[in-house]
Image (spheres, rainbow, N blue to C red):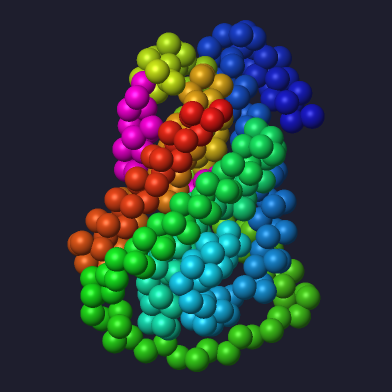
Amino acid sequence: MIKTLADWLVFTTIGLVPGSRAGEALDFFIYDTLKIFLLLTTIIYVVANIRTSFPPEKTKRMLSHKREYAGNVLAALLGIVTPFCSCSAVPLFIGFVESGVPLGVTFSFLISSPMVNEVALIMLWGLFGWRIALIYIGTGLLVAIVAGIVIGKLRMERYVQDYVWEMQVGKAEIVKQTFREKLGYARAYTLGLLQKIWPYVVAGVGLGAFIHGYAPQDFLVRYAGRDNLFAVPLAVLIGVPLYSNAAGVIPIVQALMEKGLPIGTCLAFMMAITALSLPEAIILKNVLKNRLLAVFFGIVATAIVCVGYLFNALL
């Protein structure tokens, strides 16, 4: 139905020629924009109701009682159902550290929360099928768990800014909500989140539409195809300066895959954008000292590159 509407608008109402670059790009843009916002509205509302059972204070209490390894796994899993991008997860990161959550466990959460996004998971499932969706969630969790364990083993607590350890977090009570209050929260959260992310989604779809209609396939194959040994690290280097959530970058990934970019390179590009970003680095600079910040970015970037190479070899 959405595809039919997009085709009617582009090729009948506007009058562009089917198969033309402009027509295909605009058709892609309208179709994907409508489909993505329909998916987002439905999914975010449902997930927001689930999230009422996982307020930040409850999450901190759960993680503060977990040891390493088991804590890393739990933190990574909790990251899936918590509403944080790479930047907004930083304040909770401070609360975790001060509450006694091990540093490595905290980093597993910090990586997983923006990288393994349940909205993106459902969208990937709808766009590419269950196999790629499961690859996405599995590799994202693996990166978060392994990176957190490595950072924990390095014992770098001394490279957290001193004021973080000096902060005092009160024992806030977890307020229970009625069913009506949960629905009200879900509605408000859905509208608020859509207001924040719609520019990223539109920009992502726009860039994806341009790639779909105008970017020559031979250019992408030449610089990021299977035969290019450095395609995966190049994708990560390009992705880090960008900033978007997973929902915003999926249309770009879709267009790149249609042009022949390998799945591993696409996953690496997507993970680099969502888990590592310059705005996140700027915020974390106020929490972490330079050495720990560099270790964090280095370990996560290396893990993402390894994931990209692995899946390029397997798929």
Q: What x and y, as percent, mark residue 71?
A: 51, 71
Tell me which residue sits at (66%, 55%) in the image. 44
Tell me which residue sits at (44%, 69%) in the image. 105
Residue 208 vertical position relative to residue 107 in the rendered view, above or below: above
Q: Is residue 240 magenta?
A: yes
Q: What x and y, as percent, mark residue 3?
A: 73, 26
Residue 281 falls left or right of residue 16: left
Q: Which of 241 and 257 is in front in this view?
A: 257
Q: What stretch is highlighted in magenta?
A: 228-247
Residue 107 vertical position relative to residue 216 in the rendered view, above or below: below
Tell me which residue sits at (43%, 33%) in the image. 309
Figure quadrant of the N terminus: top right
Residue 100 falls left or right of residue 74: left
Tell me which residue sits at (70%, 66%) in the image. 50
Residue 170 vertical position relative to residue 230 in the rendered view, above or below: below
Inspect this view and state whether residue 145 appears.
yes
Residue 197 falls left or right of residue 155: right
Residue 129 vertical position relative to residue 37 in the rendered view, above or below: above
Q: Does the magenta stretch include residue 180?
A: no
Q: What x and y, as percent, mark residue 235?
A: 37, 33
| Number of numbered tags placed on the structure image | 0
Toward which corner of the image does residue 90 lie, by quadrant? bottom left
Figure quadrant of the C terminus: top right
